[in-house]
Image (cartoon, rainbow, N blue to C red):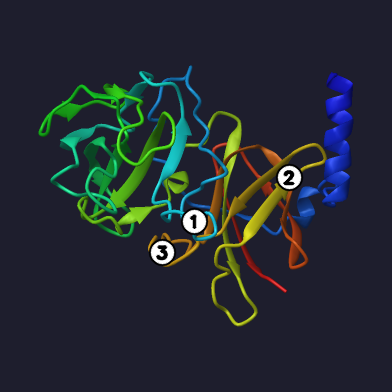
């Protein structure tokens, strides 16, 4: 059975044109300064990698809300932890005080104001949504890794998961989000891809599928679907992918782009590309 699965994966990689990456000398990526200042909002025993099928900035081809955070699918009751030290800005329901698209969007949430500002200016806040339980109150001090609640499915949620956001400046502003992949430290032995993919006329490539491959692995993600989410001014990115094991990959957009990039553990690799 294992051999059969490997053969299927090899055939799949061949069909989509995934070939072993070339040497690092051919990499189009550049290691750039990062601000990986946040830890994981879940314990090490939990699923820590965000769902690739609904990344930050994607709206599933206009079939749902543009995603303003990342989703970490875990069982109900899994402890939710503060991503960094700070003060609880808000904890409770959002039936009357609205933080999202509409009332009861997050169901039950916690927002933490951290003790540092973003490089672009503005205080950094993290939001933890769809919580089953909340174990902190507004105004409380919390330490990095302290439990603040548990994973749930309250509000607008399909299944039990933690919705995690980073907001800058105004925590009440639904549009003040930034991509959490740019703020969360990569898992051990992995790095983060940050990319700006533009069309020939210089405009951002909106809502397109992006593939990252090695000889035996394939990952898909999507560029930001619209302007309701903001890029980091240090990168002006429109796509990111975290937790890539250190090594070299092919970054591919079907019939439009195919180049090698490499990532280093704990680092951010930036790629800027003009698509055909």
Q: Which sits in the foreground, 27 or 89? A: 89
- Depth check, mark 1 against mark 2: the one in front is 1
| 182 lies above or below 275 | above
* Residue on which the image places disc 3: 233
**Residue 150 appears anywhere in the view:** yes
The circle drawn on residue 248 is 2
Residue at 84 percent across and 20 percent down: it is 2
Tags 1 and 3 in contact by the CB under 8 Å rule? no
- Quadrant showing the C terminus: bottom right
Q: Residues under labels 1 and 3: Cα distance? A: 28 Å
* Residue on which the image places disc 1: 63
Quadrant of res 77: top left
The circle drawn on residue 272 is none
On screen, residue 85 versus residue 11, left or right, reads left
Q: Earlier in the sequence, mark 1 or mark 2?
A: 1
Q: Provide residue 66's location: percent of width, then percent of height.
A: 43, 56
Quadrant of res 257: bottom right
């Amino acid at each position: 059975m294992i051999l059969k699965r490997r053969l299927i994966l090899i055939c799949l990689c061949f069909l989509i044109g995934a070939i072993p990456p070339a040497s690092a000398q051919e990499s189009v990526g550049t290691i750039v300064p990062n601000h990986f200042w946040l830890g994981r909002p879940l314990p090490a025993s939990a699923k820590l990698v965000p769902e690739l099928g609904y990344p930050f900035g994607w709206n599933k081809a206009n079939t749902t809300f543009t995603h303003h955070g990342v989703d970490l699918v875990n069982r109900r009751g899994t402890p939710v932890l503060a991503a960094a030290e700070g003060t609880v800005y808000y904890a409770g329901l959002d039936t009357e005080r609205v933080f999202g698209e509409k009332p009861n969007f997050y169901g039950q949430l916690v927002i933490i104001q951290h003790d540092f500002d973003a490089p672009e200016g503005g205080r950094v806040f993290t939001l933890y949504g769809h919580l089953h339980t909340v174990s902190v109150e507004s105004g409380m001090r919390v330490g990095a890794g302290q439990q603040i609640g548990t994973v749930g499915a309250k509000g607008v949620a399909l299944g039990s998961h933690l919705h995690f956001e980073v907001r800058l400046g105004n925590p009440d502003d639904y549009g003040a989000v930034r991509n959490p992949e740019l703020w969360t430290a990569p898992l051990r032995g992995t790095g983060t891809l940050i990319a700006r993919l533009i069309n020939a006329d210089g405009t951002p490539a909106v809502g397109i599928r992006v593939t990252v491959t090695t000889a035996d692995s394939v990952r898909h993600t999507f560029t930001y679907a619209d302007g309701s989410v903001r890029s980091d001014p240090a990168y002006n990115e429109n796509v990111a992918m975290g937790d890539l094991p250190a090594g070299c990959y092919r970054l591919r957009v079907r019939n439009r782009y195919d180049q090698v990039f490499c990532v280093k553990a704990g680092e951010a690799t930036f790629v800027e590309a003009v698509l055909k």
